[in-house]
Amino acid sequence: MFYKSTRGKDTHVSFVDAVLQGLGSDGGLLIPEQVPKITPQEWEEWRSLSLVEDAYGNFRDHELTPVKRVGEQYVLELFHGPTFAFKDLALQLLGPLFELCLERKHKQLLILGATSGDTGSAAIAGVKGRKNIRCVILYPHGRTSKIQELQMTTTADENIHCLAVKGNFDDCQNIVKGIMNSPLKEELSIGAVNSINWARILAQIVYYAYATARIQEKENCSLVDFVVPTGNFGDILAGYRPPYYCRMMGAPIGRLVIASNQNDILPRFFETGTYSYHDEVRPSLSPSMDIAISSNFERFLYYLFGGDTKRLNEKIQDLKTKKAFSVTCEELDRARQEFAAYCVDEESTKKCVAKVFRDAGYLLCPHSAVGYAAGEQFLLHRTSSKNPVVALATAHVAKFVEVDDPSSCVCHAMEKGGASPELMKALSSCMPGELQRLYNLPSRRTVIENDVEDVKQYLLRNFSEGGRCCGGFGAAAGIAVLAVAIGAIVMMKRKQ
């Protein structure tokens, strides 16, 4: 399988190069030139398969991604990995994949990533201690939960570096993109770990197919609808329906619903046809979704524009210079055929956490509550469809329950909103031991200005002697990487 850039310059990029370079040389995102098609017969056979556990032996649930009925919706639990967030599904695979490639070439890779909270800790958990990988994670100073920060900064391995940027997530992401588009990328052998990296999308495709199969077993239905808490657009893109990705490969997925918090850039686009981030990103109870520029939206735009790279480049330039772009009425209609989109504000998020706990005894994290509440809106507004609805639970609620600063956590927000004593007790006692122990570990980070040049200088000071990682692979390495790639697409095996 080969890949190409959404902006038109790069074509026929190998899987190995797509994984290691992350971005196209023109700054675009890499997408498959063709996607394999799963026949209905193959889908029926796959419905009896279970998720591969080779990369996921440290998950806490034997199903890895269990599906549970919660009220009128199903909840797909994606938080049973080592960092208690859905990013583990991709990044526990990406670490060994990077290492396999690099060991064969006797090279090193400097991973550079931006995180709004969960990607950073999951990336660190996937690559810490790996001798051929150095990892630098940028996160917005003071804009993650305390647990999210501790999961990054308490990692003792010498190959891990955490930079707290004096800005928001979009600032961090822009710095990473700026460096990835500079000569420093080649000089220091820098690769990407965000969902701009195609391997991240590959791994996330699988749990949509897996959940669909499980729901079909329970409901005897044809199609399944999904509601996805959405910030950077990578998670929902993995389930994207025609013409590509999970739906094109044959999974019987119905509607895909975008769930945004009070930073409603995506719902406004699907309402008006204009993508605009003139307004300041507002800190929320769901910080991992406090994003103005959804990087993976570019992949969707490529398909929306029929592969017209010239038009896509014009829109990307408008976004850079005018902080906005618009699509035609016909394009907006087609976009609405692919996705529904709902905004869930802070008050509605708190009410959803309280309601679901009261009615079902189930604790949702703020991000998952945004998804569940959007699912309720979707159920209310849809007309003819009776498809089961699955809301993605993207993180464990304990990641947003602070121990040393109650005034800044979801507990305080819920208590201020009049939550029941039973809910407050459940929230205050939900902290797993693995997370509780982080408060007693030494923490190390570097606070840095919101300036790409400052970050470049940090990288040069610390990694200027790094080896380069790009190049061809021998036949044996190519076969090994292909095997891992297929595993990322399928990630299934027959039950013993």
Image (cartoon, rainbow, N blue to C red):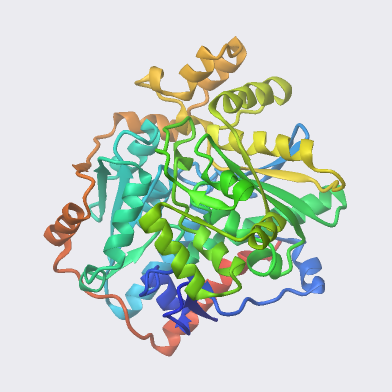
Residue at (18, 58) in percent of width and height: 456
Residue at (44, 46) in percent of width and height: 277
Q: In the image, is residue 375 above or below residue 239?
A: above
159 left or right of 492 in image: left
Residue 54: image quadrant is bottom right
Residue at (33, 36) in percent of width and height: 150
Q: In front: 28, or 469?
A: 28
Q: In the image, is residue 372 above or below residue 178?
A: above
Q: Position of residue 271 (x, y in %)?
A: 63, 46
How many marks overall?
Answer: 0
Q: In the image, is residue 12 above or below residue 423?
A: below
Q: In the image, is residue 49 above or below residue 454?
A: below
Residue 352: image quadrant is top right
Q: Position of residue 72 (x, y in %)?
A: 78, 34
Q: In front: 394, or 88?
A: 394
**Residue found at the far left of this picture:** 461
230 left or right of 151 in image: right
Residue at (53, 62) in percent of width and height: 201
Q: Position of residue 272 (x, y in %)?
A: 60, 48
Quarter of the image for the C terminus: give it: bottom right
118 left or right of 353 in image: left
Q: Position of residue 288 (x, y in %)?
A: 46, 41
> Is residue 412 in view?
yes
> Is residue 229 in view?
no
Quarter of the image for the N terminus: give it: bottom right
Q: In front: 386, or 75?
A: 386
